Image: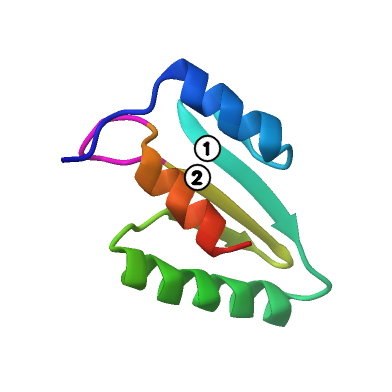
Amino acid sequence: MITKASNEQIQDFLASNSSWSVIEGKLHREYTFASFTEAFAFMNQLADIAEKHNHHPELYNCYNKVVIDLTTHETSGISQRDFDFINAIK
């Protein structure tokens, strides 16, 4: 069973992952690449990781930028599944 992360767990995660933030209840990060091709290749890598983890983030792409927003739908919030996905893309 997947449980929603506590505020303390989220703050601990953010303290050790300063490139991530919480926006509108979702873990959020923006990446900038040299080109659209590099950004899209990164999105393809994310798709492969998402399938392996059975966790599907919200991904947005505009030219050389990729935005990731993560929540776990089963918990209506952030969970360990989100932290695990982030650790998989490092």
Amino acid type assigned to the residue bearing label 1 in the image: Leu
Q: Is the magenta stretch mostly helix, strand or loop?
A: loop
- Residue 36 occupies which quadrant of the picture? bottom right
Q: Mark 1 points at which residue?
A: 27
Residue closer to the observer: 82 or 59: 82
Residue 8, above or below 19: above
Say which mark, if any, is on residue 80. Answer: none
Could you tell me residue 39's position as x and y percent?
67, 72
The residue under label 2 is: 69
Inspect this view and state whether residue 74 appears: yes
- x, y percent for residue 60: 54, 57
- The quarter in which the N terminus is drawn is top left
Q: How far apart are marks 2 and 1 (CA)?
A: 5 Å
The residues colored magenta run 71-77
Q: In which quarter of the image is the C terminus?
A: bottom right
Most extreme residue toward the right is 34
Determine whether the residue tagged by mark 1 lies in a helix, strand or loop: strand
Report if residue 24 is visible in the image. no
For marks 2 and 1, the one nearer the N-term is 1
In the image, residue 77 above or below residue 44: above
The foreground one among 80 and 48 is: 80
Count neighbours of disc 1 (C-alpha within 10 A) and say few if under 14, some if 14 to 19, many if 20 or more: many
Q: Which residue is drawn at 55% across and 71% down?
A: 43
Under tag 2, what secondary structure?
Answer: strand
Q: In this view, does 1 lie to the left or right of 6?
A: left
The residue that appears at 58% across and 40% down in the rendered structure is: 28
> Does the magenta segment cover residue 72?
yes
**Residue 30 picture location, percent across and down:** 68, 49
Amino acid type, callout 2: Asp
Front of the two marks 2 and 1: 1
